[in-house]
Amino acid sequence: MPTLMINGQPHSVDVDADTPLLWVLRDILGLNAAKFGCGIAQCGACTVYVDGKAVRACNLPVGLVGTRAITTPEGLESADPVVQAVKSAWVALDVVQCGYCQPGQVMAAVALLRTTPNPTDEQIDSAMSGNMCRCGTYMRIRAAIHHAAGELA
Amino acid sequence: MSTHSPSSAAQLKTGRRRMLQAGGALLLATLWPTARGRAAQATQAGTGVLVEDVTTPFAPNAFIRIAADNTVTLILPNIEMGQGIYTSSVMLMAEELGIDPFAVQIEAAPPGGGAEITGGSTSIMTEWLPLRQAGAAARAMLVQAAATRWGVAPESCTTANGAVVHTPTGRTVPFGDVAAEAATLPVPKEPKLKDAANYTLVGRKHHRLDSQIKVDGTARFGMDVQVPGMKIGTVAACPVQGGTLRSMNRNAALAVNGVHAVLVTDNKDTVCVVAEHYWAARKGLKALHIQWNFGKNAAITTQTIYDDLHAGLNGPAIVANAKADAPGVIGKAGATYTATYQQPLLAHSPMEPINCTAHVRPDGCDVWAGTQVAERARDTAAEITGLPASKITVHSQYIGGGFGRRLEHEYVTQCVQFAKQVPYPLKIVWSREEDITKDRYRPAYVDKLTAALDDKGYITALQHRIVGPAVVARWDPPELTKDGYDEDLSLATVVTPYTYPAYRLEFARREAPGITTAWWRGVGGTRGLFVVEGFIDELAARAGADPVAYRRAMVQNNPRALAVLERAAADAGWATPVPKGRARGMALQFAFGSYMASIAEIEMPSPDEVIIHRVTAAVDCGQVVNPDQVVAQIEGGLIFGFSAALYNEITLENGRVQQQNFNTWRVMRMNEAPRRIDVVVMPSKEDPGGIGEVGTAAAAPLLANAMAAAQGRRYRSLPLLSARNTEGKE
């Protein structure tokens, strides 16, 4: 297995190449912020970045990742202004309920604001529709993304 | 989060409250009757570690621990599953105690120490007084201790920010410095509570205490439990309930890289593959090529269940509630109206799939789980291991969505059964497919209502028959009435904002074969409100009346119902014309001790598409602890209910549940969520009502009535977008 670059650190793991990245993160490395929700890339709870792009770790075989940079929710730079704005907005608007999907929501929101600094409702809905929330926090997620965009403007 | 286990606690018994001294710490236990007397008796079997010889039918449900280092720990009776109960519970205690909610540590109460059941929207209803009493008692003792030390009158002292303050001089002493002295004082029997006018926390918006850890991803859910030496298993239960293992290729699974063991339950209905990590276990499970004997349920289909329910509309039934002679009035009425409603089986599918971790040793057993019933989790572990309850430790974790699913504990039973077979700690993780196909489902129901109507179209008598299971008969058998009635079914039927001159509620019990039915968010309220508010809306339409005006006339003598109705109508602009292409519908409810009126404004570009432009709700849930979290619960509860109302129906074919994962079990996504939800929380001095299930209960009737207005036809069957409705297929 190639060495994986996770949150800037190299990790060599002994697993079959078809093992989804999510289980390497969670069960081998103990990085638990990316969650298991469905296993078929339907819910977004496992969202991580590969080379800065949001992907679903639950069906991404580690054999395909190579040495590309992996960022998990634990690896979001707290000094990054977008990360800071998104997390503060989530807290300010009390977005979370059960919280299980929220690391994935935060990852998706940060990725959105990096490419679309001032998204419309439609752009938010489109970017976030792959991240399910069973508690139904969508109204506040939408508002929090606008709030974060406003803080960054 | 961890369970609490103080060492060598000496007790002082003080009537209904006990105080425990533990190494210079003040430890206060508040005792009050649990919501269900029977459950309270059950707590006596294993009374946990905090209070050891409970002899009365009371259980300690809240604790305050103040250590010499000034660490204040609140041990909370109800488990956090998103509903914000940790924040609200801390606010109630902190209000009286005099401390910043963000400055306290939180622990989940151990089983038998109060963490009995979190469900039924009861937490604030039952905790409202006792949590404040706990805080007030601790405050009085801390104040007395400080006043004695200073030689001043206790009346001249107050508390703030975790310290006792001598008001005339401004002197302060941190709680921790006087905790040991306070612990020697008698616990006040009736501690003086703050005047509500002086509240600084209760009734005001307070940020959730669990936001930051949930945003950062450091909050630990059951799924995240890691124990040294732990291995991970995943399971396959026979897809047909009651079936058993016929054969499997054990060696093929053991040949998979990382697989350690293949385990089978004693009754051979479930197989578990244990591995280094989930993926290896999953591959191992696949490699087994399990063959099942499907057993007697292999021919069941959804239609089997519906047919049985419809058959129950005729024949014998229990009379669950009666007022005057409803059948007599209906028999002689000049006008009557009848409608039959049908609702499907529903899965819970919380975002966190079912999981549990257990370590069974000869001398004890640890269980790590997200559970709404920690005590049942403990008891099942004791039963399986043969260990006394005192040797079982349940470590309650944050719950990644409850919705009633974690009022079941069969997954704890299953995990301990497998963990008993191995020497190491075992974490069982269900696949999403297992989570959906082996859920315990919200039952399907069929309801028939017949009303006698006066010349203006209002009800003079109402007869209502419910056909379906009695969930309580399995879940808490003593709660089934001696007639065989499940009182949960009275929610939104007998318990309603309306009064009828004559009424009769009948229940024909029909248990669904081949599946297990269970509680689901909103329980009887969700079930009943779809039927009753749909029917009321039909009667309004029949009378040619405006739906708000028709209900207004029905609640003239119910000021709280009337107030929410008027407020929602005003805020939604009910009196203004509906924008072109749109339609409005409403629901009015009284359930879980709370009133709500809600109005939806929707658009249907086609019979199978619903755009929810706006939902407006006015809620009166009595006195409120944290108003913004009431709003959050209504918003989220509505959206949770909308998924089910529009899309969801568990179906069976050949005894198997057909929906597997989120590709076939549709959950509302952000692009489908309402454009706006506006919730107003009505000021109230009434006792607090529940809120976690209020929004969900409203969801189906709200949309069904709006869709009826949009399409000019009634929606009497859920889900609303099923082919039965969109293509007229019955």
Image (spheres, coloured by chain):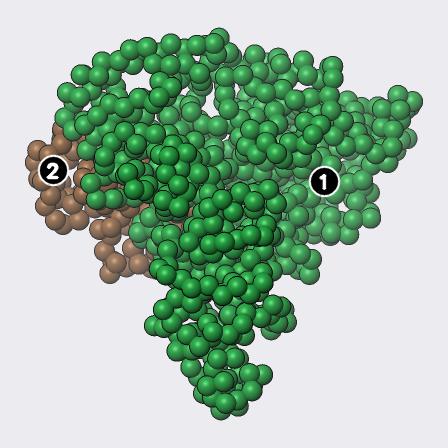
Q: Chain of mark 1?
A: B
Mark 2 — residue? A13
Instruction: Give the residue displayed 66% in from the left and 48% down from the top.
Output: B593
Tag 1: residue type?
Val
Instruction: Give the residue displayed 50% in from the left and 54% down from the top.
Output: B53
Q: Chain of mark 2?
A: A
Mark 1 — residue? B495
Relative depth, front residue between B514 and A139: B514
Q: Is residue B48 left or right of residue B721?
A: left
Question: Which class describes the residues within 10 Å of circle 2: few (<14), some (14-19), or many (20+)?
Answer: some
Q: Is residue A50 visible?
A: no
Instruction: Give the residue displayed 53% in from the left and 60% down from the top.
Output: B30
Q: Compared to B639, does B261 lie above or below? A: above
Q: Is residue B533 left or right of residue B295?
A: right
Assign a secondary structure to mark 1.
loop
Rendered location of residue B413, percent (x, y): 40, 32
Tag 2: residue type?
Val
Looking at the image, which residue sits at the far left? Answer: A2
Quadrant that contains the C terminus of chain B: top right
Badges 2 and 1, same chain: no
- Shown in green, the chain is B
Res. B334 image quadrant: top right
Instruction: Give the residue displayed 40% in from the left and 37% down from the top.
Output: B382
